[in-house]
Image (spheres, rainbow, N blue to C red):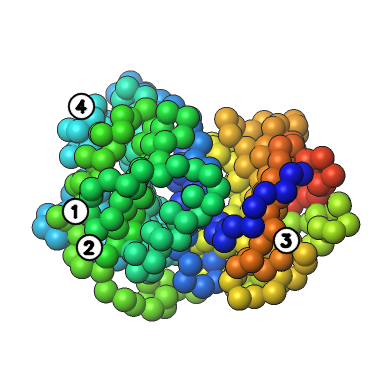
């Protein structure tokens, strides 16, 4: 693996960070108020949406009139689907809502091979979350372009698709566009500017009041690095002091054939000594995965504390097992395996 510069690396997640929130089953967990949409994972082109079967009515997102409080709203009611359709000039096919910990997400699919993924952080002050995301993107060498929108905003282009990072009335949000022009994505983000109530600080317990894992949420993880010796060790959620169920951001495990990108990774919480030499680890597969078959993947490994890392990166392969919850990986001298457990 090649050594890179020593950035302040924040696995986002979503946060983020994970684009494709509606395109696969990706479970995430986190132990402290670092935004889940702050994972610094590269955005990847998502699978093209498919047309509904004949006779199938489009899924209609709920519509909320007046100022919106995201903490009290259905995920797909925050960003209005009908207004998005008007901007795109396309008909809505379906919406996929999800709320994982303190991250609210909705995926909107439209005809014409277009998709919009929306994420919002319900816990962390918007400016704080935004600054971490932009810093991590710049550290990874990704160019972000400031735009005049909301409190502050920036656009990033990747393989012809665009991501819009923004703060609106104190809230941090991300809008990912697939098959959508840059200006159209900015216009979609502008829908939020006069729609949100002002952000107010709150506690994690108030945002995520239940301690019962939601079906599909990550409840355990084991990543075993077998080689090289200077990276070898076993990392689990317990060793990271991540108690499940918790909020998204510090551990991620994609599960299922629709996950694109397919991501497995973890990051040791800031100001905490890692249980092994490795403080951050991520593997990412773009373009889909076939079980029991080697597929190309990109890797990032950080040695040391998460707030003072020596980063290494490279290309290799992964083999995902038939259960979609485990697999093996190899990239040059780097070799290992992983297992993820999710709630039923």
Q: CA distance from mark 1 to mark 4?
A: 21 Å
Residue under label 4, please give it: 89
Identify the residue shown where x is 14% and y is 55%: 194
Residue occupying image coordinates x 74% and y 52% = 338
Q: Residues within 10 Å of mark 2 (few under 14, many from 20)?
A: many
In the image, farthest residue toward the front: 5
Q: Which of the two marks, 4 or 2, is nearer to us in this view?
A: 2
Residue at 50% over, 62% down: 248
- Give whichever of discs 1 and 2 has the lower sequence position: 2
Provide the residue designation for mark 1.
Answer: 193
| Left or right of 212 in this view: 208 | left
Q: Tell me the mark number nearer the camera, choosing from 2 and 3.
A: 3
In this view, 13 is above or below 327: below
Percent x, y of residue 303: 72, 61
Residue holding disc 3: 303
Are the residues tagged 1 and 2 within 8 Å (C-beta)? yes
**Of the residues under marks 2 and 3, which one precedes in the sequence?**
2
Q: Earlier in the sequence, mark 3 or mark 1?
A: 1
Q: Nearer the viewer, residue 120 or 299?
A: 299
Q: Earlier in the sequence, mark 1 or mark 4?
A: 4
Q: In the rendered image, which residue does mark 2 sit on?
A: 169
Quarter of the rendering occupied by the N terminus: top right
Which quarter shows the C terminus? Answer: bottom right
| Badge 1: residue crowd in 10 Å (few <14, some 14–19, many ≥20) | some
Res 223 quadrant in image: bottom right
Closer-to-camera residue (73/79): 79
Q: State the CA–CA distance, disc 1 to disc 2.
A: 7 Å
């Amino acid at each position: 693996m090649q050594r890179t510069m020593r950035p302040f690396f924040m696995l986002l997640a979503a946060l983020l960070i994970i684009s494709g929130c509606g395109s696969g089953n990706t479970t995430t967990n986190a132990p402290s108020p670092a935004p889940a949409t702050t994972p610094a994972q590269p955005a990847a082109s998502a699978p093209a949406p498919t047309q509904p079967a004949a006779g199938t009515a489009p899924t209609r997102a709920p519509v909320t009139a007046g100022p919106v409080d995201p903490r009290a709203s259905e995920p797909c009611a925050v960003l209005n689907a009908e207004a998005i359709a008007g901007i795109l000039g396309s008909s809505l096919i379906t919406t996929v809502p999800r709320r994982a910990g303190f991250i609210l997400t909705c995926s909107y699919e439209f005809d014409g091979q277009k998709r919009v993924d929306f994420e919002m952080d319900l816990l962390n002050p918007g400016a704080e979350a935004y600054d971490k995301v932009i810093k991590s993107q710049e550290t990874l060498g990704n160019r972000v372009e400031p735009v005049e929108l909301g409190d502050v905003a920036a656009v990033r282009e990747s393989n012809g698709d665009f991501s819009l990072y923004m703060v609106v009335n104190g809230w941090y949000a991300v809008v990912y566009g697939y098959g959508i022009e840059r200006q159209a994505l900015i216009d979609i983000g502008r829908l939020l500017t006069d729609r949100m109530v002002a952000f107010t600080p709150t506690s994690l317990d108030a945002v995520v009041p239940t301690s019962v894992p939601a079906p599909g949420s990550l409840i355990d993880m084991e990543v075993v690095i077998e080689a090289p010796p200077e990276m070898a060790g076993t990392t689990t959620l317990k060793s990271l002091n991540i108690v499940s169920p918790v909020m998204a951001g510090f551990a991620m495990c994609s599960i299922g054939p629709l996950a694109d990108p397919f991501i497995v990774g973890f990051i040791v919480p800031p100001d905490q000594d890692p249980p092994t030499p490795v403080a951050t680890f991520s593997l990412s597969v773009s373009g889909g995965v076939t079980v029991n078959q080697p597929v190309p993947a990109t890797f990032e490994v950080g040695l040391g504390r998460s707030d003072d890392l020596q980063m290494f990166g490279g290309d290799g392969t992964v083999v995902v097992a038939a259960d979609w919850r485990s697999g093996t990986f190899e990239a040059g001298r780097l070799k290992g395996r992983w297992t993820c457990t999710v709630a039923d």
